[in-house]
């Protein structure tokens, strides 16, 4: 006697490939909202980045020590243990002294702006006779050097610079997710219409 079983509903190809497009849309909207918060709270953002950076260094040092202790005697390297201990100590200092960590981050970022500005200035100065667009590179280089100096010597400017860079990254990611969600919905509708027309 054959046992009758109710056939399972199979999902169409469009449902399998392009389901939950609205999840991407929601993620994009949330990222844009987060970017607005980041732009409006530069000090808190810099403090958060400083804490997580210090935490990563601390965890890296702790894992290095655990790995050294777990290794056999013949596999243990004294330099590895030394670096791990230093990383652990620096991680503890960085997470407990967020202002100092924030200053280090802003100084590094500021010098990066300065070096990038000098490079832009040199490139622009070299090509300004052949191409008038070189003057734009010269001006961009000058502004980059000025911004870098401000960041190095003023932690407030550094906080704004760091939060602006992070905020722009989050904003662009949110916009990209929204565009992708709209594209997926359009393709889903196109595939659905194509399958129904057959």
Image (cartoon, rainbow, N blue to C red):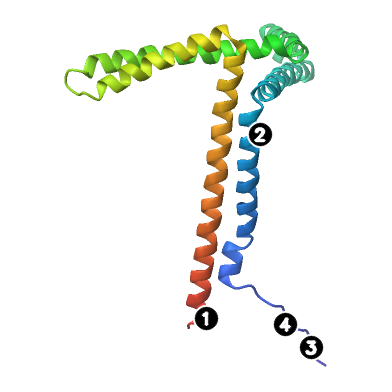
- Against 74, residue 185 (above or below) is below
- The CA span between labels 3 and 1 is 30 Å
- Tell me the crowding category of disc 4: few under 14, some 14 to 19, or many 20 or more residues within 10 angstroms, Cα based: few
Quarter of the rendering occupied by the N terminus: bottom right
- Do the CB atoms of the residues marked 4 and 2 lie less than 8 Å apart? no
Which residue, given by chain and number where applicable, does mark 4 sit on? 7
Mark closer to the chain start, 1 or 2: 2
**Residue at screen point 61% across, 19% down:** 159
Give x and y (percent) for residue 89: 75, 9
In this orientation, which residue lies closer to the viewer: 104 or 128? 128
Which residue, given by chain and number where applicable, does mark 1 sit on? 196
Give x and y (percent) for residue 11: 64, 72
Which residue, given by chain and number where applicable, does mark 3 sit on? 4
Quadrant housing residue 116: top left
- Do the CB atoms of the residues marked 3 and 2 lie less than 8 Å apart? no
Tell me: 139 left or right of 11: left
Q: Where residue 178 is drawn, which disc sits there?
A: none
- The CA span between labels 4 and 1 is 21 Å
């Amino acid at each position: 006697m054959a046992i009758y079983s109710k056939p399972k509903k199979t999902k169409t190809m469009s449902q399998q490939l392009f389901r939950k497009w609205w999840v991407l849309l929601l993620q994009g909207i949330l990222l844009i909202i987060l970017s607005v918060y980041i732009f409006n709270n530069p000090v808190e953002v810099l403090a958060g980045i400083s804490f997580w950076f210090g935490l990563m260094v601390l965890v890296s040092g702790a894992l290095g020590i655990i790995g050294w202790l777990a290794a056999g005697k013949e596999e243990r390297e004294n330099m590895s243990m030394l670096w791990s201990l230093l990383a652990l100590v620096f991680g503890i200092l960085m997470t407990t002294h967020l202002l100092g960590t924030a200053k280090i981050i802003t100084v590094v970022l500021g010098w990066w702006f300065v070096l990038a500005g000098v490079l832009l200035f040199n490139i622009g100065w070299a090509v300004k006779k052949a191409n008038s667009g070189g003057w734009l590179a010269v001006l961009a280089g000058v502004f980059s050097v000025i911004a870098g100096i401000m960041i190095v010597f003023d932690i407030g400017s550094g906080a704004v610079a760091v939060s602006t860079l992070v905020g722009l990254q989050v904003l662009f990611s949110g916009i990209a997710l929204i565009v992708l969600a709209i594209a997926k919905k359009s393709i889903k509708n196109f595939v659905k219409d194509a399958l129904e027309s057959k």
